[in-house]
Every structure is written in structure tokens, then in C-alpha cells.
Image: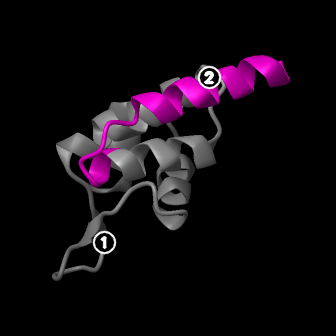
Amino acid sequence: MIVNELAKSAGVSPSVVRYYSRIGLLHPLRNPDNGYRDYSAEDVNLVRFIRKAQWLGFTLKDVETILEHVASGESPCSDVRRLIIERMTEN
């Protein structure tokens, strides 16, 4: 799916999808025929996760840390607990 389709499915604007791609939270493939970014159905879930995490007070850097743990097969639970305590202290 292209940027606009992903944005509509995830309930965000296309600029949000492009920004997440630019900072490395999303990793779309390029369509060889037209060069468009090609997103998967899993990317819809990922964008929704990122937005919910932000709503809960996590920064995009926090989300990046969590996703790095998941990608490497590690449990992010200890980091998530630490981040929750940090955010509670800040607020």
C-alpha cells in the first residue's frame, strides 16, 4: 500500500507516515515500477502502536528503543518499565 492508503488505514496524515519513514521507525520497500514507498499491513499496526505510545507519553526516541529490542528478539519489558518511571517522574 502507498503512503495515503497507510495513513488512512492508521488514522494519521500522510506527512506523519513520511516522517516516521524518514526517522527510521518505518522501513518501506520501494516499488521498482514507480519508485513509490510500499508499506505492508503490519505497518498499519506499527503506526497505530507508535501513536498510542505517544499518547501515553512516550517519545519517538522511546518508541525507537522499544522497537530495537523487539527487532533483535529481546524483551523490551525492562526498558518499558524504566521509561514509564522516567515519564512519571518528569510529569
Residue to which mark 2 is pinned? 84
Say whether residue 56 is left or right of residue 34. right
- Answer yes or no: is residue 11 visible: no
Who comes first in sequence, dot 1 or dot 2? 1
Kindly identify the amino acid type of the residue bearing the numbered disc 1: Tyr
Residue to which mark 1 is pinned? 36
Above or below 18: residue 16: above
The dominant secondary structure in magenta is helix
The number of callouts visible is 2
In x, y percent, where is residue 82?
60, 29
Q: Which segment is the magenta one?
A: 70-91
Residue at 24% over, 48% down: 73
Residue at 60% over, 19% down: 56
Above or below 38: residue 3: above
Say whether residue 24 is left or right of residue 1. right
Q: In the current view of this chain or complex, which residue is farthest to the front?
A: 78
Say which quarter of the image contains residue 41. top left
Residue at 32% over, 36% down: 75
In x, y percent, where is residue 53?
53, 28
Q: Could you tell me if the residues under marks 1 and 2 are in contact, i.e. CB atoms within 8 Å?
A: no
Kindly identify the amino acid type of the residue bearing the numbered disc 2: Ile
Front-most of residues 57 and 69:
69
